[in-house]
């Protein structure tokens, strides 16, 4: 059975494990007071930074989580990694040993792994998930571009023979002109000088990058390993490009969030969610005529449920949204939920109580039965079985 072909991808992103996003676990940033991981690394005393990262990385995701993911019927984990994953960038502690562990856990649990290069030097989008908020200059630095490509090559060589390797995603969310202009992070860099020259990632550059990355990765990876390309927030623009380039076993990744759409509408409404999801479904169908498409990020988070105080009504809203989205994403090669966990675990001293962001957290979705497939879970997100 081949994921994305004979069997739908049913995956989850391990966000905020090896690439930090402050909104997902604010407690990690309390000591430094910064807004993103790069500035955390720059300002914290090195030994304290290493201790903080080690404690987080050791506890945020463990083999027990892989067991829970597999027990819920998922077949893939996507692991976002930073450009300093290999530990060779001064001032930025690497994390390759945790990727090694993840492959071993995945193999034991019957899960496949998609490696996702989530950040690059200078950032590809100016988001905190690109490493540094408000800065988007990577594309203008040939050395930084080459470095990112060599990181992909080195990761491919390291993991090409791993049985659990599903594939590699070249770059997460290279930003389009429209999204860059409307992003809350645009223009909010801590160091305005560093942000000079920031801007979107042009389509011509992106195609050149993808062409080069494909050539390098396909020469290293096994033929059955999938090479994934984010659509750059331009799903309809690719059409038959991958086929014309002669690329084989590739997939286009698109990210679709109801909660992101809601920043542009004044009042939340279920009819609006239906319309938005139906549009996403239609766009996927059109793109999939040319290249396999997956929804690499999505979640249940929506304002309608967030504002609902009654737990029964809130559950009904979440379950309806889940039904809408899963039905729509079923026309694609599959979907990967963002994200596995927010706030984290008891070892870091965080509360697991409500925080208004529960729809992002798959473990919370499991506990509350907000997706029809997520029933009979125990309090820690694992299924309970009547004997």
Image: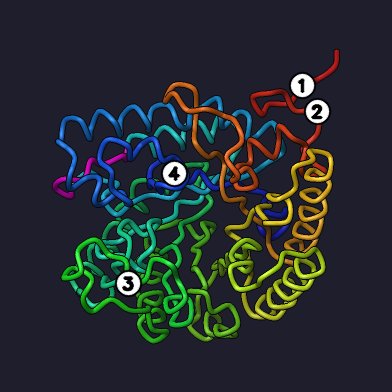
Which image quadrant for residue 176? bottom left
- Residue 122 in picture, x, y percent from top left: 25, 65
Eye-nearest disc, 3 or 2:
3
Q: Measured along the vertical axis of the image, is residue 193 above or below residue 317?
A: below
Q: CA distance from mark 3 to mark 1?
A: 48 Å
Residue under label 2, please give it: 376
Q: Are marks 1 and 2 in contact (CB under 8 Å)?
A: yes
Q: Measured along the vertical axis of the image, is residue 103 above or below residue 200?
A: above
Eye-nearest disc, 4 or 3:
3
Residues in magenta, as a range: 89-96
Residue at 29 percent of width and 54 percent of height? 83
Residue at 52 percent of width and 49 percent of height? 78
Q: Is residue 183 visible?
A: yes
Residue under label 4, please give it: 16
Q: CA distance from mark 1 to mark 2?
A: 6 Å
In front: 5, or 38? 38
Q: Residues within 10 Å of mark 4 (few under 14, many from 20)?
A: many
């Amino acid at each position: 059975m081949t994921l994305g072909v004979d069997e739908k991808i049913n995956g989850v992103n391990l966000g905020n494990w090896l690439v930090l996003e402050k909104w997902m676990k604010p407690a990690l940033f309390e000591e430094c007071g910064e807004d993103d991981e790069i500035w955390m690394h720059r300002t914290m005393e090195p030994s304290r930074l290493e201790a903080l990262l080690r404690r987080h990385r050791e506890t945020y995701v463990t083999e027990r989580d892989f067991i829970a993911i597999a027990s819920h019927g998922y077949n893939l984990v996507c692991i976002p990694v930073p450009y300093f994953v290999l530990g060779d960038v001064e001032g930025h502690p690497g994390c390759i040993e945790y990727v090694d562990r993840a492959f071993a856990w995945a193999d034991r649990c019957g899960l496949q792994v998609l490696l996702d290069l989530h950040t690059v030097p200078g950032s590809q989008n100016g988001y905190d998930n690109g490493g540094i908020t408000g800065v988007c200059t990577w594309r203008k630095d040939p050395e930084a571009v080459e470095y990112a490509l060599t990181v992909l090559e080195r990761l491919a060589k390291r993991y090409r023979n791993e049985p659990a390797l599903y594939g590699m995603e070249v770059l997460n969310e290279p930003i389009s002109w429209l999204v860059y202009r409307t992003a809350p992070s645009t223009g909010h860099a801590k160091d305005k000088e560093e942000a000079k020259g920031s801007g979107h990632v042009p389509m011509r550059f992106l195609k050149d990058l993808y062409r080069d990355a494909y050539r390098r990765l396909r020469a290293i990876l096994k033929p059955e390993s999938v090479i994934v390309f984010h659509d750059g927030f331009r799903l309809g623009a690719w059409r038959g490009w991958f086929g014309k380039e002669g690329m084989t076993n590739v997939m286009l990744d698109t990210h679709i969030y109801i909660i992101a759409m809601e920043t542009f509408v004044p009042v939340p409404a279920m009819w609006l969610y239906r319309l938005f999801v139906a549009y996403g479904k239609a766009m996927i169908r059109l793109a999939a005529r040319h290249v396999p498409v997956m929804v690499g990020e999505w979640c249940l988070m929506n304002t309608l449920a967030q504002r609902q105080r009654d737990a029964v009504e809130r559950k009904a809203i979440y379950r309806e949204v889940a039904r809408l989205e899963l039905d729509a994403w079923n026309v694609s090669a599959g979907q990967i939920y963002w994200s596995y966990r927010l706030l984290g675990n008891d070892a870091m001293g965080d509360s697991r109580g409500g925080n208004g962001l529960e729809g992002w957290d798959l473990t919370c979705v499991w506990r509350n039965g907000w997706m029809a497939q997520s029933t009979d879970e125990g309090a820690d997100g694992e299924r309970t079985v009547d004997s």
